[in-house]
Amino acid sequence: MLFESERFQGRLTKPVSWSDHVFRYSEFTGINTEGGDVDSVFVSCKIENCEWYWGLFNLEIFVAVDFNKCIFRGTAFSGSKFVDCSFNNCEFLKDNLGASCSFDDVVWYGCTQNNCTGLNE
């Protein structure tokens, strides 16, 4: 399902989820997610003050997405693609069992980061 120019604050409500959707020109603010898969497509979106704990980003596609002040704890990014994305003041932290975020088979094209923790150049 396509969601265009939508604003999501605090939570996602059905039928919206992080899975099997396309988000274009949308904004996500203050959403905290524990577990679950994220396998949607995000184009020209803003994601701010959102937190993921044990998130599974599988084959995710992000194009021209601005991540601001997001926190990822023990999150796995597997086969994801990031194109022209920016990461500002984001944190990629260990979970409560000491596991770091993982980036298996992730592809980065033209992305930038500023003042991020746990995200290597």
Image (spheres, rainbow, N blue to C red):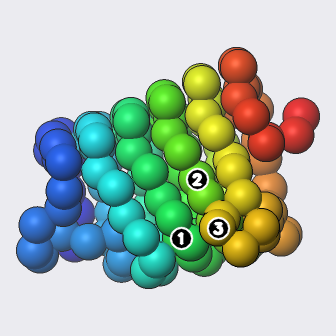
The mark nearer the N terminus, 1 or 3, is 1
Q: What residue do we see at 28% from left, 41% from top?
A: 30
Most distant residue in the right direction: 121
Decide: few, some or many residues near mark 2? Use Cα within 10 Å; few <14, some 14-19, many ≥20. Answer: many
**Amino acid, disc 1:** Gly
**Amino acid, disc 3:** Asn
Foreground of the two, 75 or 37: 75
Q: Is residue 41 above or below residue 89?
A: below
The residue carrying mark 3 is 96
Q: Are marks 1 and 2 in contact (CB under 8 Å)?
A: yes
Q: Quadrant of the C terminus?
A: top right
Decide: few, some or many residues near mark 1? Use Cα within 10 Å; few <14, some 14-19, many ≥20. Answer: many
Q: Mark on residue 55?
A: 1
Residue 89 in the image: state x and y as whole percent.
60, 24
Residue 6 appears in view: yes
Q: Mark on residue 72?
A: 2
Q: Is residue 49 left or right of residue 80?
A: left
Decide: few, some or many residues near mark 3? Use Cα within 10 Å; few <14, some 14-19, many ≥20. Answer: few
Residue 80 appears in view: no
User: Distance from label 2 to label 3 (Cα)?
Assistant: 12 Å
Q: Is residue 103 left or right of residue 92?
A: right
Q: In which quarter of the image is the N terminus?
A: bottom left
